[in-house]
């Protein structure tokens, strides 16, 4: 029984164990399937969760980023506005601080002024105290002076009474004297047969005529004495002419204007700290004036050749656009060489055109330089060529050497372009230059004598002088239009005709001389000298003219008789 129970228990235990094992096997098998299913379900759940999380992330993160961007933009705008507000506040603070400083300065100035006023009041108080003491002293002195004044007043009254008595005696004597004078005048009128007024006028007329004759004779003596000092008088006339015309002549003949495209180019011409303009002026010897004149630069200098070099060089620099000291030096040197070549070519072409041979190369170069000189607004080379041709025509008409006259006419003003000798007249300088380069003696004399500096020794000299006058005197040659030329001649004749005794006036030699014909009954020989001087003074005062005007007064007596 015990064994059976034990066996039963053992069988039951074994069965239980087998059942448990089978159950675990089955359970493990079923759980494994469930586990696989569960894993599948978990994976699908995870995937769905990931998809939901991704969609949620995209939805909410993008919203958050957009919100963050908006927040950041708003914050930046708010920061900029705050910064601007801070700037405005700072500006206001600065302006208020400046105003406060100004107020403080004004207060300080007022305090200083107040201190000065207090000091001045104190000084005035001291002066007033001193003045009061002085016034007291003066009051005492015034009392004594008042007593003296009273004494003097009594004396003055006595003196006035004496003067009144003397005046009364003088009046009575004056009345008696007037009566005597009236009696004498009536007696003189009876003796002379003229009234007092007629006698006074006759006496005055006699005095005036005597004074005129005496002044005319004295004037002749003074004029003769002045002729002995003609050099000094000529210098004064030249200085007066220079004073009248130097300013306008200098402006017209010493300035060249260079046009530029825009005013911005002026800054490049000047350069940094003025280095370009200084280099240009040092290289050319011409002053450059950069002012407010729109789109223009002014070149100022007395040497026309240098001024032309500077003008061409500046035009090329402006066109090129490269303006610096090295480039300036290069361009100026190149232009200077070109101008020198052009001067020589001009001289050679002129000599060939005038059919002149054997002229020294230096004289040829100086002839070319005449192109850049003017005389009273007339181009010097053109004037010299014109003078040469006119002299040649005159010499040919007189059967003289036309070639010499032509040569002398071309070279007569050569001294004006010589820079070395500035002390002697240009005619003498030209004559010395012609002698130096072995020109003919007659040519040298004509060059030196065309302004009467030396004596004329050949017939070529007066021919050149006449040709020079003809070339310079023709209407329009020297800065004068025909209308202005005619008006000047008419004014000359009107000025001379306004004088008493003048019958006719003729302006000749293009206004360089006037001939005045006078009535011989009204103007004496002595008065003619005075009249010529008065007319020349009137012309000198009322007119502007180049050179000089010769006044010739002609008085002649014609006696006519008829034989029957």
Image: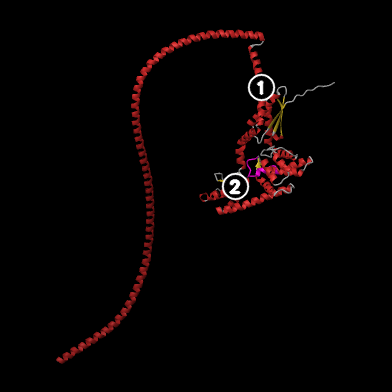
The stretch drawn in magenta includes residue 72: no
Q: Secondary structure at mark 1?
A: helix
Do the numbered discs 2 and 1 sit on residues whose CB atoms are within 8 Å?
Answer: no
Left or right placement of residue 466 versus residue 133 in this view: right
- Which residue is tagged 2? 258
> Which of 57 and 124 lies nearest the eye of the viewer?
124
How packed mark 2 is, by other alpha carbons closer than 10 Å (few <14, some 14-19, many 20 or more), is some
Q: How many marks overall?
A: 2
Q: Is residue 298 left or right of residue 82?
A: right
Which colour style is shown?
secondary structure
First reached walking from the N terminus: tag 2 or tag 1: 1
The image's mark for residue 214 is: 1
Q: Position of residue 88 (x, y in %)?
A: 38, 48
Q: Dot 1, how many residues are within 10 Å of its Cα: few (below 14), some (14-19), or many (20+)?
A: few
Image quadrant occupied by the C terminus: top right
The magenta-colored residue range is 411-424
Q: Is residue 474 visible in this depiction of the protein?
A: no
In the rendered image, the vertical position of residue 55 relative to residue 35, given as above or below: above
Nearest the eye: 14 or 143 = 143
Q: Residue at x 35, y 32 (%)?
A: 120
Q: Main secondary structure of the magenta part?
A: loop
Label 2: state its secondary structure: strand
x and y, in percent, of residue 550 in the image: 69, 32
Question: At 52% from the left edge and 9% from the top edge, which residue is drawn?
Answer: 170
């Amino acid at each position: 029984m015990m064994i059976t129970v034990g066996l039963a228990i053992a069988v039951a235990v074994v069965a239980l164990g087998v059942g448990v094992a089978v159950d675990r096997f089955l359970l493990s098998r079923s759980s494994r399937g469930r586990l696989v299913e569960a894993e599948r379900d978990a994976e699908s759940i995870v995937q769905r969760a990931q998809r939901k999380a991704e969609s949620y992330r995209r939805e909410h993160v993008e919203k958050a980023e957009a919100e963050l961007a908006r927040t950041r933009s708003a914050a930046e705008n708010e920061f900029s506005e705050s910064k601007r507000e801070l700037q405005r506040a700072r500006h206001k603070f600065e302006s208020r601080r400046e105003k406060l400083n100004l107020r403080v300065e004004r207060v300080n100035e007022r305090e200083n002024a107040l201190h000065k006023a207090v000091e001045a009041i104190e000084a005035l108080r001291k002066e007033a105290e001193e003045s009061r003491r002085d016034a007291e002293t003066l009051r005492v002195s015034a009392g004594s002076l008042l007593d003296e004044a009273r004494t003097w007043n009594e004396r003055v009254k006595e003196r006035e009474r004496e003067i009144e008595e003397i005046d009364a005696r003088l009046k009575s004597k004056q009345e008696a004297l007037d009566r005597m004078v009236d009696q004498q005048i009536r007696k003189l009128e009876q003796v002379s047969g003229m009234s007092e007024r007629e006698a006074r006028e006759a006496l005055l007329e006699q005095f005036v005529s005597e004074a005129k004759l005496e002044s005319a004779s004295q004037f002749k003596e003074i004029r003769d004495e002045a002729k002995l000092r003609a050099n000094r008088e000529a210098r004064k006339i030249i200085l007066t002419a220079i004073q009248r015309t130097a300013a306008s002549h200098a402006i017209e003949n010493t300035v060249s204007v260079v046009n530029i495209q825009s005013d911005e180019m002026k800054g490049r011409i000047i350069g940094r700290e003025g280095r370009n303009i200084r280099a240009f002026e040092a290289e050319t010897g011409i002053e450059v004036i950069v002012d407010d004149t729109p789109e223009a630069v002014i070149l100022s200098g007395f040497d026309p050749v240098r001024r032309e070099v500077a003008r061409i060089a500046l035009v090329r620099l402006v066109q090129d656009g490269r303006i610096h000291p090295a480039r300036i030096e290069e361009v100026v040197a190149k232009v200077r060489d070109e101008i020198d070549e052009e001067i020589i070519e001009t001289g050679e072409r002129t000599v060939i055109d005038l059919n002149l041979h054997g002229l020294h190369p230096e004289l040829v170069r100086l002839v070319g330089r005449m192109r850049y000189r003017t005389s009273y607004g007339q181009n010097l080379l053109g004037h010299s060529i014109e003078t040469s041709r006119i002299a040649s025509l005159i010499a040919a008409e007189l059967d003289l050497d036309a070639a010499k006259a032509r040569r002398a006419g071309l070279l007569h003003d050569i001294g004006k372009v010589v820079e070395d000798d500035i002390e002697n007249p240009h005619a003498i300088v030209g004559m010395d230059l012609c002698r130096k380069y072995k020109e003919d003696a007659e040519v040298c004399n004509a060059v030196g004598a065309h302004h009467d500096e030396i004596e004329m020794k050949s017939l070529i000299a007066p021919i050149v002088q006449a040709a020079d006058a003809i070339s310079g005197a023709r209407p329009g040659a020297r800065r004068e239009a025909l209308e202005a030329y005619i008006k000047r001649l008419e004014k000359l004749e009107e000025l001379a005709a306004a004088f008493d005794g003048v019958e006719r006036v003729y302006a000749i030699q293009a206004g360089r001389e006037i001939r005045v014909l006078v009535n011989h009954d009204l103007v004496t020989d002595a008065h003619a000298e005075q009249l010529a001087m008065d007319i020349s003074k009137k012309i000198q005062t009322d007119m502007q003219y180049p050179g000089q005007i010769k006044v010739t007064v002609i008085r002649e007596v014609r006696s006519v008789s008829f034989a029957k």
